Image (spheres, coloured by chain):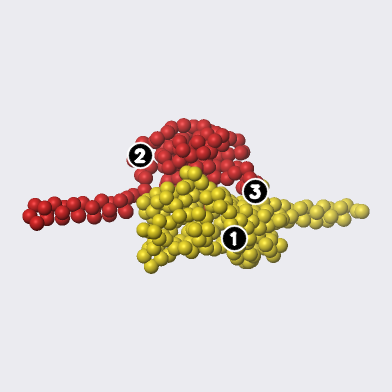
Amino acid sequence: MNKTSILFAAIITFGLMAFTNHSGGIYKTNTGNINFFSHTPVEDITADNHKVKTAFDAETGKLQFSVLIKDFEFPKALMQEHFNENYMESTKYPKSTFTGTIDKMSAVNLAKDGTYKSSITGKLTMKDVTKEVSTMATFVVKGGIVNAKASFTVNPVDYHIAIPKTVAAKISNEIKINVDADYTHSH
Amino acid sequence: MTRPIIILIIVLALGAVFYGYNTYNKPHTNVGKSEAAETLLATEIFVAFDTNEQAAMAIYSDKVIQVEGQLLSKDLSNEKEPQILLKGNGDEGFVRCGFKPTELSKVLALTDSSTVKIKGVCMGCNGSEELDLLGSKDVVLSNCIIIK
């Protein structure tokens, strides 16, 4: 093998290694957004959390979330107090977690800017109650950042969140959860 | 019904309406005007949560806490809430402090590796050993302000 061939082979090898490192591995963020929204004819309730920890494995599609319940901020302090103390008991159950899979991970090309879709399935845990959840997610790859958006609904009753009859008309039994996270490759 | 009683009922009703309105619209905790319930090092609050999360939640959560620690980095990846990381326990854990966007200029003025004093509301500790992809655990303070 002459010098030119060796040099060419080395360039190809290092190029492939760089490509593999960039598209594989763990993508994560500690500043993901989760918003939830409850709509009833009586009242709309919304809250936001901007410190969501989430990561996915680009090889296997394994996906994880951890969110602090107390860190949801409501427009009104009283709503936030009732949410934490009466409904979520967030001192006793401080976190909600999701562990699941990006079902079509191979269809999301992390090395190429573009928009990709995949279903997500997994287990959502709140107040020590775990339920299966599935939804569609949109992944937008741009300049090395992977933005993922997904929405799904949960019924408070499924997670043993007791709503007193006096305020039942104000809280929907279909709470919409909106997830929006910018993942970057974790070195 | 005599006049004084009618006036008393009206005053009581107005008082109840006023109380209800104020309770419904009470503001969020003003961290700047609140005395810190606890003052400690960032490493100390991280160890407290790492050792016994439930006990630490009972002591610190929902309270205005003042922490002092080494600024490891600024995390400005979410424009809705600029954040900084204080040293907690090596690479295994940090104290993550979130600020209102209005505090961004003060956050930007901080120097990496310097010692900073922060006051904020303690929300708990995010992450866990079971969630292996997430890496470090973070003790979280929100609505923070910079003391020094």
Q: Residues at marks 2 and 3, common chain?
A: yes
Q: What residue is pinned by disc 3?
A: B133
Residue found at x 63% / y 47%: B131
> What residue would you read off at disc 1?
A133
Which chain can be seen in red? B
Residue A180, position as x, y percentages in the image: 54, 59
The chain painted yellow is A
Amino acid type of the residue tagged 2 in the rendering: Ser
Cα gap from disc 2 to disc 3, whole angstroms? 37 Å
Disc 2: host chain: B
Name which quarter of the figure residue A46 lies in: bottom left
- Circle 3: residue type: Leu
The residue at the point 30 percent across, 51 percent down is: B23
Q: Secondary structure at mark 1?
A: strand
Graded by Cα atoms within 10 Å as few (under 14), some (14 to 19) or many (20 or more), the crowding at tag 2 reads few
B126 and A181: which one is in front? Answer: B126
Q: Are marks 1 and 2 on the same chain?
A: no
Give the image location of residue A167, x and y in percent.
38, 59
Which of the labelled discs sits on residue B34, or is there none? 2
Circles 2 and 3 in contact, beta carbons < 8 Å: no
